[in-house]
Amino acid sequence: MALYNILLSDMKSGRCSDTAEVRLLRFWEARNVRKGGELMSVDMLFVETDATVMFRDRLTEGSVYTLSGFDVVQSGPNFRLCDAPLMIRFNDGTSFDKKLNPDRPIPTESFRFMLYSRLIELANTGKQLPDIIGKVNAIRSTITDRIPGAQRVMLTLHLESGENVCVSMFDSMALVFHTKFDSHKKEPRIVIATSINPKIVGGMLF
C-alpha cells in the first residue's frame, strides 16, 4: 500500500516534514547579467494529481520526485510561474528521490495561456511569467546570419486572436531552439513559449 503524500493544495506556510509527490515541469533560471550571467537561483514549476542552485544538477525536467523536509512560504509578487498562493523552498535539510513509477498519475504538462490584452497589462511589470502559443510567421537568427557576438533568435508568432508577438531567445537557449526548430521542416510550425517576461518595446509586445 502506498504511503500518504501531502497535496500541494493542502500545504500551509512553515517547515513541512511531510512528503509530496510531484512532477517537475520546467525550470526558470535567474541570472545576474552584471556578473557575466552568474546563476543566482532556479525557480521550478511542479504539478501533481489534484529552489535553489545547489540541487540544479540533480533535477530533470519531466521527472517525478518525492520531496520532504522543505519550507512552505508565500509566493512572491514578481516573476510568478503560476497562480498558486504558496511555494516550496528547498533548505539544507531537504531530501528528494526520483520516482520511476508514481503512486498516482501526474500530468506531464501544464500551461497558463493568457489573452493578448492580459499580456499587454503585464508588460514591463515583471509580475507574471505566462505562456503563449502561436504560428511562426517569421524568424531572425544571428546563428543563421552568422553575426558575431551573443547568439539571439527572434520569432514573430501569430496568435489565434490575430495579433503578432515577438519572442526573443539568447545564448544557450537560442542555440537549443535553433537546432530543434531546424529539425522540423513541415508547415505550419506552431511554437509554445513558456515562462515569458512580456515587455513593450517600440510599441510592440516582446
Image: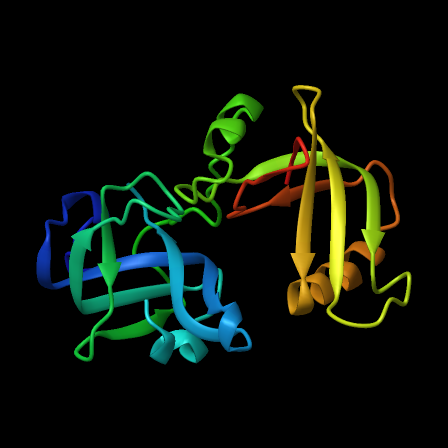
Q: Nearer the viewer, residue 154 or 64?
A: 154
Which quarter of the figure has residue 56? Answer: bottom left
Q: Quadrant of the C terminus?
A: top right
**Does the rendering let one see residue 200?**
yes
Q: Residue furthest right?
A: 145
Q: Name the residue: 68% across, 28% down.
A: 159
Q: Name the residue: 91% across, 61% down.
A: 145
Marker count (numbered): 0
The colour scheme used to paint the residues is rainbow
In the displayed structure, 2 sits above or below 105; it is: below
Residue 203, position in %: x, y?
66, 31
Q: Name the residue: 48% across, 47% down.
A: 109
Q: Quadrant of the N terminus?
A: bottom left
Q: Nearer the viewer, residue 201 or 157?
A: 201
Which quarter of the figure has residue 64? Answer: bottom left
Q: Nearer the viewer, residue 49 or 101?
A: 49
Residue 61, position in %: x, y?
49, 63
Q: Name the residue: 14% across, 49% down.
A: 11
Q: Is residue 205 left or right of residue 154?
A: left
Residue 105, position in %: x, y?
37, 49
Which quarter of the figure has residue 199? Answer: top right
Q: Is residue 145 left or right of residue 90?
A: right
Residue 91, position in %: x, y?
20, 73
**Does the rendering let one see residue 5?**
no
